[in-house]
Image (cartoon, helix red, strand yellow):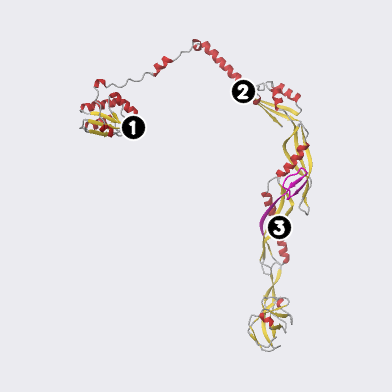
Amino acid sequence: MKTKIITLESHDDLISVRDKLSWAKTSRILLVWPKYEKVALRLLDLKVLQRHADSLGAHLGLVTRRMNVRRDAESLGIPVFKTTISAQKDPWPDSAPRTQRTPKPPKRDLRAMRNEVLVKEPAWRTSLLGRVVTFSAGVLAVLVMAGLFVPRAAVTLYPEAYNASIVIPVSAETSKTSVSLTGEIPARSISITVSAEGSVPVTSQISIPKNKARGVVQFTNLGPDEILIPAGTVVAATSLIRFVTLNDTRLPAGVDEIVEVRIEALEPGEQANLEIGEIEVVEGPLGLSITVSNPEPTTGGTNARVIGADDNDRTALREFVLGDLKAQAMEQTRSQIGTHDLLLEDTFEIVEIQREEFSPPVGEAGTTLALSIQAEFTAHYILADDLNQLAASAVNASIPQGFSAFGEMTFTLLDTPATDSSGVTYFQLEATQMALRNVDALTVFNLIRGVSLPQAQTDLQETLVLRDEPQIAITPAWWKWLPLIPFNISVEVK
């Protein structure tokens, strides 16, 4: 049988769906609910649509998985299918007569159902007297609980105290790895590299080479053959001042044959002005075949007086830069160790100067002399934790029974640490620690809990050995008794 399938949309209402039914010309009309959208059709709307389908001579059916729609449709006798395919394949049940199309009765009134099962309270609970008594009992219980748990007390005690002090002879060396009760303690090493620069104006005058010396030398043949002496052949004096020949020369064949050649010093300056006979060396392979001598002095080498740094300027600047370098290294070393660590200053030293550059270099003119130095420094230091461990062991051993250490320990160096040639540093350390007489908290609780404030102060002074009267603060301030529960009482020892 032919079926008209109408797919509903979320904006459809009774009027739009009724119009869609009117256009159907089949004996069966199937309304399909969208899967993920909601259509605003109520039970009454379904009943109107069913009657309209009857007036058109058609049978109305639904495709939906919504339980509320299925329940309403079943109450009206409208067949409901899971899919459109099953609606076309499965037979449709006959439509029920209009007299049997009655929806399910509404649910019973919840208020009436509640009244049926509600158990009424006894009369004494609803009476004014009963309510007053119950309220008073509740208030009294709250007050009792508040009296037990709300009051709090802070007790400050000042037990007997004294300062325990001991002098410890300390020896520190890098070979030690642990703290010893005899005073031996490890020393740590630290290495740091720093750079510093400095400059000073120069007013000194120095002599610098200006012109090269020149002269003549005689070469003597030691063999029978002719020898070619090329230009640039190097000859030297015993003072290592060197000259070069200025032109090519042939030394005639024959033993003791002589030839003269002009020479010029390799370096300018007065030091190349030599006396007769000072040039004696021929460098290179030719020195095996010939000899050399200067028959006359070399002349023409001159120096010029200019402003430049002399040795005194360089020494003074070096000392200044090294002082600045050491100050920087000391500051950086202190910043890299702990605040309370002990730096052994007499172990601070330069290990290596890695770079030292003067500008201008030695022998050059300049009105300003600059120096840049980079050096590595080392030093030894002692950890504050090691000092604490050593001092704590010694001081605690001196505290008598019944007393305990209190507060921070203080240290004082009685002399300046001195390091011997073997690298061991010796000094005396005075350690001071406050000690307080022990106070048993349980005894304090048993003395003061539940009693009045004046009585608690009196009992504490009579039972404990105190250097000052105890202080007790109760919260709230108008409460006159200390709490009964111990955990509401805090005890602080000072």
The residue that disc 2 covers is 149
- Give, as a three-letter code, the residue at label 2: Phe
Which residue has dot 3 on it? Answer: 351
> Label 2 to label 3, Cα distance in Å?
70 Å
* Nearest to N terminus: mark 1 or mark 2: 1
Q: Secondary structure at mark 3?
A: strand
- Tell me the distance, in whole angstroms, between the alpha carbons under discs 1 and 2: 58 Å
Quarter of image, res 437: top right
x, y (%) of residue 85?
A: 28, 34
Q: Is residue 270 visible?
A: no
> Mark 1 — residue?
38
Residue at point 79% right, 42% down?
167
Q: Give the residue drawn at x 26%, y 20%.
A: 100
**Residue 3 versus residue 89: which sits nearer the camera?**
89
In this view of the protein, which residue sits in the foreground, 126 or 182?
182
Prevailing secondary structure of the magenta residues: strand
Q: Which secondary structure, mark 1?
A: loop
- Which region of the structure is painted magenta? 170-197
Of the residues shown, which amino acid type is indicated by label 3?
Val
Q: Looking at the rendering, which quadrant does residue 117 occupy? A: top left
Whether residue 399 sits left or right of residue 357 in the image: it is: right
